[in-house]
Amino acid sequence: MPTALITGATAGIGAAFARRLAADAYSLVLVARDELRLTQAADQLKLRYGVNVEVLPADLGTDEGLAKVESRLRGGVDLLVNNAGFGNAGHFPHVPVADEVRMLKVHCEAVLRLTLAALPGMTERDRGAIVNVASVAAFFTRGTYSASKAWVVNFSESAANEVANPRIRIMALCPGFVRTEFHRRASMDDSSIPGFLWLKADDVVREAMRDLALGRRVSVPDLRYKAIVAVGRLVPRRLQAMVSQRIGR
């Protein structure tokens, strides 16, 4: 059985990846901060899909947590899904600097370090894949969150270029608004987000796995968001910023 390690695996897109990969007969390594939720998720996946599931409690906002996951990745995995992430309540520059730095550690440093930990084993076996979960926000200007996700997209494309091995795929996944715990955990009011913009996590993962199989380096699930990104690249940056600030504030 191939093995997949998923960070942020107990809810939302991470949990959807776990379900999809378990259905595809992957052995799983689930990473999250809450050990109880990890254990419950693992038990459900074992019962439903009959796959091996390992739990690895770790806080990727700390060096200790990152080191634990790096160590496991050096043992070898076939697929790494860097999904862990969060949003801060409030807007730049009113968010405490400690919260901003923690976001950069989880969204950027963790993606960098875990990718570097996984690649040697993949290179040795001449196969493997890494999915770095970014966001459609990466293509717009909305504070530290969008800036960090823009880094994830650029890093993923750059890493794929540097590795230059078609049997080792590195892809940035850029979903739009997805029905998960994300906004509630960040105490964000999502009532202003139009209903037609919401996506389902399972649909996002299905499109992501298809794009990964096709060798794409950036995946934007759903035609609605593909159109939004395409239009966003055509309009002036100042207008783009005004619109992005109004949607989902």
Image (tube, helix red, strand yellow):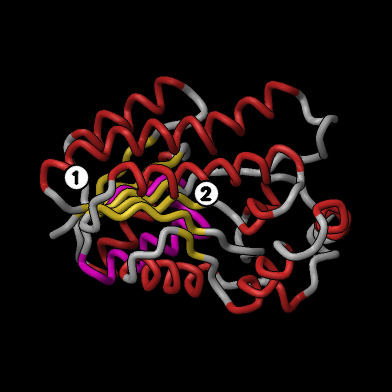
Q: Which residue lies at the image location 64% right of the left edge and 71% below the top edge?
A: 225
Residue 181: x %, y % from top left = 62, 55
Residue 157: x %, y % from top left = 44, 49
Q: Which residue lies at the image location 48% right of the left edge and 23% below the top edge?
A: 62
Q: Please tell me the numbered disc located at residue 153.
A: 2
Q: Earlier in the sequence, mark 1 or mark 2?
A: 1
Q: Please tell me the numbered disc located at residue 122.
A: 1
**Where is the N terminus found, in terms of image quarters?**
bottom left
In-image side of 71 versus 62 (left or right): left
Residue 16: x %, y % from top left = 44, 64
In-image side of 220 versus 18 (left or right): right
Q: CA distance from mark 1 to mark 2?
A: 21 Å
Residue 193 highlighted magenta (yes or no): no
Res. 127 visible in picture: yes
In-image side of 159 versus 119 (left or right): right
Residue 10 highlighted magenta (yes or no): yes
Question: Where is residue 91, by image quadrant?
Answer: top right
Residue 177: x %, y % from top left = 66, 64
Type of residue at label 1?
A: Met
Q: Which residue lies at the image location 23% right of the left edge and 52% below the top edge?
A: 165
Q: Which residues are magenta?
A: 4-25
